[in-house]
Amino acid sequence: MESCITPACQSARDIFHELEEHYDEHNLYFQTIGSVLEAADALKVPHRLKLILTQPKNEIMIHFPVQMDDGSWQLFKGYRVQHNNVLGPYKGGIRFHPEVKLDEVKTLSLLMTMKCALARLPYGGAKGALRVDPRSLSPHELQKVTRRLTAALGSNIGPDHDIPAPDVGTNAQIMAWMADTYINFSDSSKKTTALGVVTGKPLEFGGSEGREKATGQGLVYVLDALLPGMQMDIGQLTYSLIGYGNVGSWTARLLKDRGSKLLTVMDHTGAIYNADGIDADALAEHVRATGGVAQFKDAEAISNENFYSTQVDLFIPAALEQMVDLEHAEHMSCKVLVEAANAPTTPRAERYLLDKGVQILPAILCNSGGVTVSYFEWKQNRQSETWDAEDIDARLKKIMTAAAKRVLETAERLDCNMRVASYASAIEHIDKVYKVRGVFP
Ligand code: NAD
């Protein structure tokens, strides 16, 4: 990984020095808090707010054993990091991935605090993870592991306290097992509201219309709001995509409806290219059947180098963190980097691309459609209501458009880039709430 060279690093160094914590500049958490503190400095918020945001409120680590199908036992490690709850209950996804680390989860929880605040949702930020490769488990093992994880989290989650959702490696079925386990543990007087302990559930079991496509849909609404100001037409543009999971595949299918052309896609199985455009629906079907984009018959296989250097209007990373580093950035040829994944761009890559005139639309704006429709699901669960798909889309569009305008207005007012502006708008809101609530005691 690369060292952090943004001006924000000094701010992060000073705060960690004050807290007697030692972080190196290669650390993702250090890099992310650095950008957040840069925004806090631009706003000149009270020092206490910078201290509060620099560390999560709670970092929960759990270990639990599960007996596998072959009779052997495995010990699993899980995390739930609750970053901040001044705006409302903690909220954030839960990830199943074999290489997940605590600092990655801390980073993602910090981004959730920022994301919910920017969208003005009544939530704080959290994130969870389990160190496991879900593809290596049988369906029976996956269910046992999920239920045991939920039991181990116990009262650390709850519909009024901390509400997980799907993320990398988890899906609606896993959310259903989590909700069912939690409901089984709750008092008979609380079973109805207990359904709201997780969002992203299947439609038949308290899920919401539009949740599955929500992150991609929200991203398209952000593009609708911002591209005209960049003299770009969504119906005329070309793009490349990293990741063809929930976020990547929905983004592609929705952009297909708008007339954008997908030239190249890369995922964990390889990279593919078609100069005439890749059909997003056919590719989604292929990925469902085979597990990845490799071997898709209507595109040619290309190297990762050629993937990054393909000339496109939009470059959309929708996979894991830090997949756009300086080396990649030097080969990239795009007008706008649209961050669908969380923290996909390293600070050096960001600086290089901004200097080259590439616009970067930040993750906390672009991918907040997921948590927004999660909020709608939670509200429906609390009120025992079901809203129709048109209603969900209209409400989502309103929130995404308002958030995009907020970022533009803040960038202009503070004369800064969109990432700093998105954090600044979030921090401004959090600061106001701390001012009216006060800091206990
Ligand atoms: P997913 O598990 O559905 O898909 C992940 C994708 O990443 C897969 O296509 C996989 O092939 C690809 N990938 C994994 N390792 C890779 C590698 N080394 N090289 C290239 N591709 C690789 O996950 P998702 O839910 O689509 O999440 C993607 C990103 O979006 C994550 O950063 C997540 O935190 C973020 N996000 C997701 C949601 C949501 O609602 N699911 C909401 C907000 C943000």
Image (cartoon, rainbow, N blue to C red):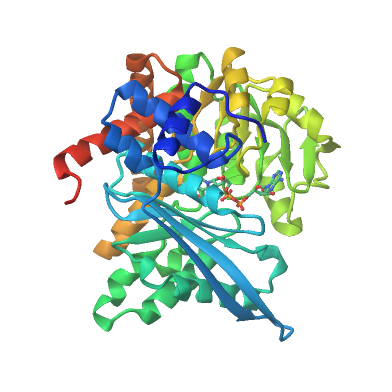
Residue at 16% over, 43% down: 438
Image: 197 above or below 439: below
Residue 163: percent from the left, percent from the top?
A: 38, 60
Residue 19: percent from the left, percent from the top?
A: 40, 42
Mark count: 0
In the image, 398 versus 374, the foreground residue is: 374
Residue at 60% over, 70% down: 76
Residue 200: percent from the left, percent from the top?
A: 45, 58
Say whether residue 95 is left or right of residue 193. right
Residue 59: percent from the left, percent from the top?
A: 44, 57
Q: In the picture, residue 102 is in which quadrant? A: bottom right
Q: In the picture, residue 418 is in which quadrant? A: top left
In the image, 325 versus 282, the foreground residue is: 325
Residue at 35% over, 52% down: 375
Q: Is residue 296 visible?
A: yes
Say whether residue 415 is left or right of residue 319. left
Quarter of the image with the N terminus in it: top right
Q: Is residue 394 visible?
A: no
Q: In the picture, residue 206 is in which quadrant? A: bottom left
